[in-house]
């Protein structure tokens, strides 16, 4: 099969109504207690807590984490006055399917990855959390 690893997707495909970030934190390896590293780039992974702006999103689909690989903690765009979260877009998004067997029945689930965070509507030169590495254009597994 030609597809191995994460599948590149557009931000608008994953979040057609937009997305809001609540915060960002380092992802720590459970066993070693050290920062978890991206298998392809070797960069640390950061989890951005995201609320899907789609009014039809419910339950687990309403709140997700997007893993961002970057050398430093991603800087989120400015807050919207009066709201507790920030509108965001992600650069170089990818989706990684996996089997979640933690429930009563195994199910296919998806891990969302990105190479950067930016203010909605800005082009590649806008305010970004981390530049995308030149060698890779899809997010890592």
Image (spheres, rainbow, N blue to C red):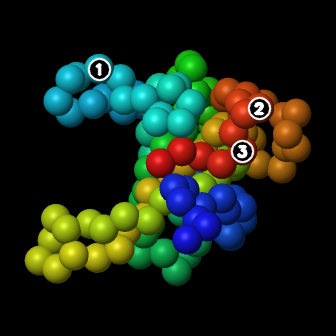
Residue bearing the label numbered 2: 134
Q: What element carries label 3?
A: loop
Instruction: Give the number of marks.
Output: 3
The earlier-in-sequence mark between 1 and 3 is: 1
Mark 1–mark 3 Cα distance, whole angstroms, equals 26 Å
Q: Where is residue 36 in the image (x, y as percent from the top left)?
A: 37, 29
Mark 3 crowdedness (10 Å alpha carbons): few <14, some 14-19, many ≥20: some
Q: Is residue 141 above or below residue 96?
A: above
Q: Position of residue 26 (x, y in %)?
A: 40, 28
Residue at position x 30%, y 68% from top?
99
- 81 or 132: which is nearer to us? 132
Farthest-out residue, front: 1
Residue 137 shows which numbered tag?
3
Residue bearing the label numbered 1: 34
Mark 2–mark 3 Cα distance, whole angstroms, equals 7 Å
Q: In this view, does 64 lie above or below 99?
A: above
Left or right of residue 1, residue 110 in this image: left
Q: Which quarter of the image is occupied by the N terminus?
A: bottom right
Mark 2 crowdedness (10 Å alpha carbons): few <14, some 14-19, many ≥20: few
Farthest-out residue, left: 104
Mark 1 crowdedness (10 Å alpha carbons): few <14, some 14-19, many ≥20: few
């Amino acid at each position: 099969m030609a597809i191995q690893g994460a599948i590149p997707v557009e931000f608008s495909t994953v979040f057609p109504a937009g997305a809001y970030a609540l915060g960002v934190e380092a992802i720590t390896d459970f066993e070693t207690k050290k920062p978890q590293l991206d298998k392809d780039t070797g960069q640390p992974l950061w989890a951005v807590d995201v609320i899907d702006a789609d009014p039809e999103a419910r339950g687990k689909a309403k709140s997700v984490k997007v893993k961002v690989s970057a050398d430093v903690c991603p800087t989120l765009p400015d807050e919207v006055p009066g709201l507790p979260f920030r509108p965001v877009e992600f650069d170089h998004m990818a989706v990684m399917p996996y089997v979640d067997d933690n429930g009563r029945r195994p199910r296919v689930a998806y891990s969302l990855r990105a190479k950067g965070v930016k203010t909605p509507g800005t082009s590649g030169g806008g305010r970004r959390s981390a530049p995308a590495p030149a060698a890779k254009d899809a997010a890592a597994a």
